[in-house]
Image (tube, rainbow, N blue to C red):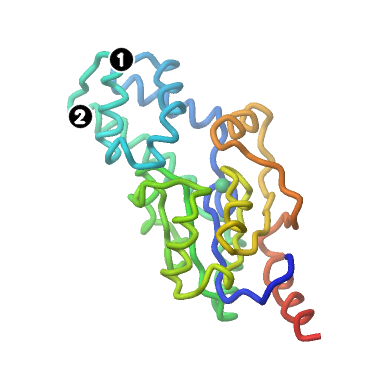
Amino acid sequence: MSAGKNPSAIVFDLYDTLVPGGSRAVRDGVSHAMARDLGVDPEAFAEAIRDSFDARCRGTLGDLHQTLFHLAEQFGTQPERAALDAAAERRLELHRSLLAPATGVLETLGRLRRSGYRLGLISDCSAETPMLWRESALAKCFDVTVFSCEIRARKPDRALYRRAAASLGVEPGDCLYIGDGASDELAGAERAGMTALKISVEHIDARTQTDRRELYGVRSWRGRVIHDIADLPALLEKAAGDDLN
Ligand SMILES: [Mg+2]
């Protein structure tokens, strides 16, 4: 961590930070099955899902059913409710599986809260994530969540970081932000006044890495990096100790 006072709150990214983002192959496989439900071309639909990432994250295509209807309409199809339900359920099932955190993640978040840190979450996400959030074991770990599709802004928009800090009842300067770095989120957090720390936890295949760069515009990061969230409590304790000396 860089200089600055010790944080009283920690703000986390979600995908590829606390839970996997899912490989390109798995995501496309789900998109292909959804396309068959909706009666559209599987490959083209998978591209449409990918191409709509920005709009879906900004919440401009509506809820999940509205989004799927809109995407299917691009192919000249107006699917029936049952087809939309089937496709939506596949997408929800994918995200249910993604939103199941590893035991170590829950343990660390619990430890941080018991140490007195307030915890926030900022996620660039489409409608599925807030729909499923309360089902996830992660939900009870957080004091505050900011979902891009709900506030209609994406990282690194300063509004997300400010919203998280204000909801936590602290200044941005009191927050440590932790994420994998997608969408320029780390530099964005620092521009908003937070201290940022990169976490690099997932070993993803080359095709998925390319996918991530295309979708999220991952930037280089010269600041501190950790490779296991379990290292965080000790890092914070050390930083607090250094500050006292
Ligand atoms: Mg991420």
> Between 19 and 125, which is closer to the camera in this rendering?
125
Labelled disc at residue 82:
2
Q: Above or below — where is 188 with respect to 52?
A: below
Residue behind label 1 places its C-beta within 8 angstroms of ligand 1 = no
Observer able to see residue 213: yes
> Between 145 and 134, which is closer to the camera in this rendering?
145
Residue 135 lies in what quarter of the image?
A: bottom left
Q: Position of residue 138 (x, y in %)?
A: 47, 61
43 left or right of 233?
left
Residue, disc 1? 75
Q: Position of residue 141 (x, y in %)?
A: 48, 68
Observer able to see residue 141: no
Q: Above or below — where is 199 with respect to 52?
A: below
Identity of the residue furthest to the bottom in this view: 244
Q: Secondary structure at mark 2?
A: helix
Of the residues shown, which amino acid type is indicated by label 2?
A: Ala
Identity of the residue furthest to the left in this view: 80
Question: How packed is label 1: few (under 14 Cα within 10 Å), some, or many (20 or more)?
Answer: some
115 left or right of 91?
right
Q: Position of residue 204 (x, y in %)?
A: 66, 37
**Residue ID at (54%, 67%):** 172
**Residue ID at (30%, 33%):** 67
**Residue ID at (59%, 61%):** 177
Q: Position of residue 84 (x, y in %)?
A: 25, 30
